Image (tube, grey):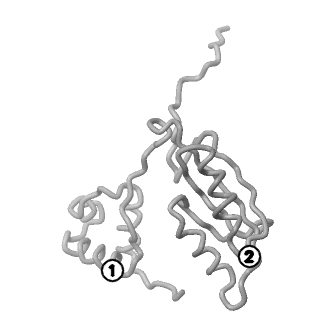
Amino acid sequence: MKPYKIDQLSVNILEILNDNAKTSHADIARQLAVKEAEVAKAIKRLEKDRIIVRYKSQINWERIKHDEVRALIEVKVTPMRGVGFDAIAEDIYRFPEVNSVYLLSGSYDLLIQVEGPNLREVSLFVSEKLSTIKNIQSTVTHFILKKYKEDGVVMVDRSESKRLPVSL
C-alpha cells in the first residue's frame, strides 16, 4: 500500500471528525480558521480516497442488548503461499458474525471479534465455520464479560467512591 500524502489541514479535519463525526463543515471551518468550502473540498477528497471510510456512532450496546454475546478469538494459521495471511483473513471477514479481523505479532496470527445473539451461536460459529477454514491450525476463544473502555471512551457509569470518608 502506497503512503498517502496528506496536508496539515486534512489531518486537523480528521482529528476533529474522529472526536465527533457529527461536527458540521461550518464548525470545523470555524475551529481551524479556514473557509467552509475548503473543509468541504478536503472532506470530499478524503472520502473519495478512502481515508474517511465511514462515519460512525459509538453506542453502548451493553446497556440495551443484555443477551448478546461478544468474543475475541485468537487464531493460529498456516500462511498460504503467495498471499500470506490475506486470503485467510478475507475468508474470515466475509462472515456476518465477524466485526473485526486483525493480523498480530506474537503467539497467534489473527485476532477476530465476533458477535452473536447467544453463547451457542458464537460457539457454533467457531466450531462449524471458523475452525473448518483451510490452513487454520487452532483457535482460542475469549468471551467478553464486561466492556470498560472502547476507542478511548469509558463505557461504564462512574459512580462516586464507595470508600468511607475519614475525618481526623
Q: Mark 2: which amino acid?
A: Asn
Disc with the residue nearer the chain's start (1 vs 2)? 1
Badge 2 element? loop
Q: Which mark is residue 48?
A: 1
Q: Which residue is the site of mark 2?
A: 135
Question: Against 152, is 61 above or below?
Answer: above
Q: Residue at x 64, y 18 (%)?
A: 163
Q: Residue furthest top?
A: 168
Q: Quadrant of the C terminus?
A: top right
Q: Quadrant of residue 90?
A: bottom right
Badge 1 element? helix
Q: Quadrant of residue 16?
A: bottom left
Q: Residue furthest bottom?
A: 82
**Is residue 22 toward the left or the right of residue 4 in the image?**
left
Foreground of the two, 73 or 54: 73
Q: Quadrant of the N terminus?
A: bottom right
